[in-house]
Amino acid sequence: MARRFDLLVFDWDGTLMDSTAVIAASLQAACSDIGLPVPAEERARHIIGLGLHDALRYVLPGVPPAIYPQVVERYGHHFRSREESAPLFTGVEETLRALHAAGHMLAVATGKSRRGLDRVLERTGLASLFHATRCGEEAANKPAPEMLFDLQSELGVEKTRTLMIGDTTHDLQMAQNAGVAGLAAAFGAHPREQLLALQPLDCFDEPQALWTWLIRHA
């Protein structure tokens, strides 16, 4: 079967790695450490994928930006102590290897820092499978389209041949803003109904169903 998409762009947290609970708990612990209101888990999960300042502005309304570095420092402390407990979703490595072998170009577009992404790519052994990656400090953050534009330009792929796969409305809005197709992972940070409102090609409640779709239809 001919490929429908040449470039498959994956979000990381909540799409390839089961890390949304770790991120939310780390943010809650950071706020507690410095005496800020502790956000509810749903609110903490909503910011996953956003850029740092956009995320903190949403989750800590009214808190002066001058306080953000303290939150970031404590968040980093808690996240690094927890991150190795966050596994890849079952079937991720096998699926990426199969897609790579089938001739797809694979990329990551994430709000993670470059240091954080490189660390987790090394830990999981997946770095060699990706043709390109973009992180939060390297382009305008989701839902702006720049990460996708950069990846398409670097790899020489047209928007009609690009698919964005993610678990948040930020991912799907980025896809829309870039004029590319989106595929939704409803097993990550954002609820299914919010993802469906953005009209992805399809929406999956279980990782294996998403991997099967990509192998058969991408």
Image (tube, rainbow, N blue to C red):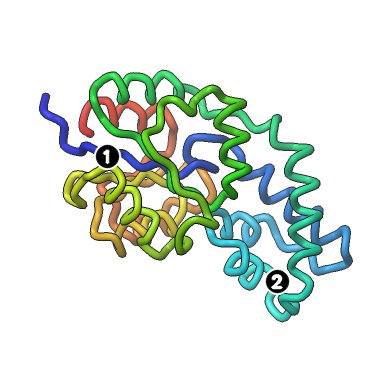
Determine the residue located farthest toward the front in the rendered image: 154
Q: Residue at x 24, y 21 (%)?
A: 102
Q: Which one is nearer the viewer's eye here, 178 or 216?
A: 178
Name the spot of residue 211 as percent of width and height, x first: 36, 28
* Residue 7: numbered disc: 1
> What is the spatial separation of the Cα atoms under label 1 and label 2, in whole angstroms?
36 Å
Q: Name which quarter of the figure residue 175 lies in.
A: bottom left
Q: Which one is nearer the viewer's eye here, 3 or 91?
A: 3
What residue is disc 2 on?
60
Q: Which residue is drawn at 22% across and 26% down?
A: 216
- Disc 1 on helix, strand or loop? strand
Name the spot of residue 74 as percent of width and height, x first: 81, 54
Q: Residues within 10 Å of mark 1 (few under 14, many from 20)?
A: many
Name the spot of residue 48 as percent of width and height, x first: 57, 54
Q: Residue at x 61, y 62 (%)?
A: 52
Name the spot of residue 31 as percent of width and height, x first: 80, 61
Q: In which quarter of the image is the N terminus?
A: top left
Picture layout, residue 131 above or below residue 72:
above
Q: Residues within 10 Å of mark 2 (few under 14, many from 20)?
A: some
Residue 27 shown left or right of residue 143 in the figure: right
Q: What residue type is labelled 1?
A: Leu
Picture layout, residue 42 above or below residue 125:
below
